[in-house]
Amino acid sequence: MRVCLLASGSKGNSLFIETEESRILIDVGLSAREIVRRLAVIGVDASELDGVFVSHEHVDHVRGVDVLSRKFHIPVHISYPTHQKIREGIRDTDVVEFESGYSFCFRDLLIDPFSITHDACDPVGFTIECRDGKAGIATDLGIATRLVSDKLKGCRVLVIESNHDEEMLMDGPYPWHLKQRIKSRHGHLSNHDSATLLAEVLHPGLEGLFLAHLSEVNNDPAIARQVTANLLTSQTTCSPRLIVGDQYCPSEILNL
């Protein structure tokens, strides 16, 4: 399994996962042209993609879905409510609808979309399981529910949100209503929220950890890394490779 955050942040998100038989994207939040360019940076031809999986309808997750899927004839897997929400934007796309809470097979993968709390119509996280183990993806969630922590247990690699530093958010330039939205049950996880979730799912088989969806305004990669590193050094269960996502370039590639 190879995992790379092609983009991560408020301006656009996309995650690349490759297994023995599959090359997929979770979300296409940049332009199709930029996604193609970033895939090339990591040595992947966009024409070799097998599928796109959409977490929710916000533009920083679906901006390039339509053009990329049409240009390279890539099926788009999306929940029925989310498809209805953005139907006009993907009219000529090969769409396969799924239902949150029900796992399904795709090539050599078992895909399990699970409900998360965010201000979208039907937001989901994913676990992606293959012969090499399980990857868990949970970003854009206001709180980490018991369902989320249960789904993320036993993963070999995790991609979890570490959106904001609480002090930076409250002291920052955002208007009060936006600060309240970010801090709400349907907003985003702070660095400390992320560490709390991580503490619940640590296990000896966890080998890779990506911190995702960092705010450029309300967070600092060094702070997010340090909060998580403090947690990791305080325990002896595991010592995963820690990678912080970036808005403007692909992350390191995790090879498992």
Image (tube, rainbow, N blue to C red):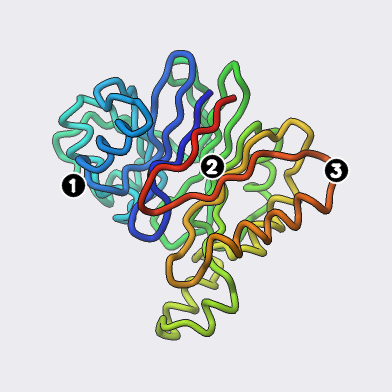
| Image position, residue 48 (x, y; %) | 29, 20
Q: Residue at x 58, y 38 (%)?
A: 136
Q: Position of residue 193 (x, y in %)?
A: 65, 62
Q: Residue at x 41, y 81 (%)?
A: 174
Give the residue type at disc 1: Gly
Structural distance between the alpha carbons of marks 3 and 2:
23 Å
Mark 1 / mark 3, whichever is N-terminal: 1
Q: Position of residue 127 (x, y in %)?
A: 55, 35
Q: Looking at the image, which is closer to me, 190 or 66?
A: 190
- In the rendered image, residue 26, in percent from the top left (x then y), is placed at 41, 38
Residue receiving disc 3: 236
Mark 1 is surrounded, within 10 Å at the Cα level, by few (under 14), some (14 to 19) or many (20 or more) other residues, namely: some
Q: Which residue is mark 2?
A: 137
- Is 242 situated above or below 174? above
Callout 2 secondary element: strand
Q: Classify 10 Å Cα crowding around label 2: few (below 14), some (14-19), many (20 and above).
A: many
Mark pair 2, 1: CA separation = 25 Å
Work out whether residue 41 or residue 36 is closer to the camera in this orientation and state it: 41
Classify 184 as above or below 138: below
Q: Quadrant of residue 9?
A: bottom left
SS at mark 3 in the image: loop
Q: Can you name the residue that lies furthest to the right here?
A: 236
Which of the pair 57/100 is nearer the observer? 57
Query: Considering the numbered disc 1 on the image, is that residue within a helix, a strand or a loop?
Result: helix
Who's the residue at 30% across and 31% down the image? 40
Residue to which mark 1 is pinned: 89
Q: Earlier in the sequence, mark 2 or mark 1?
A: 1
Of pointers 3 and 2, the one earlier in the residue sequence: 2
Quadrant in which the C terminus appears: top right
Left or right relative to 21: residue 49? left
Q: Which of label 2 and label 1 is nearer to you? A: 2
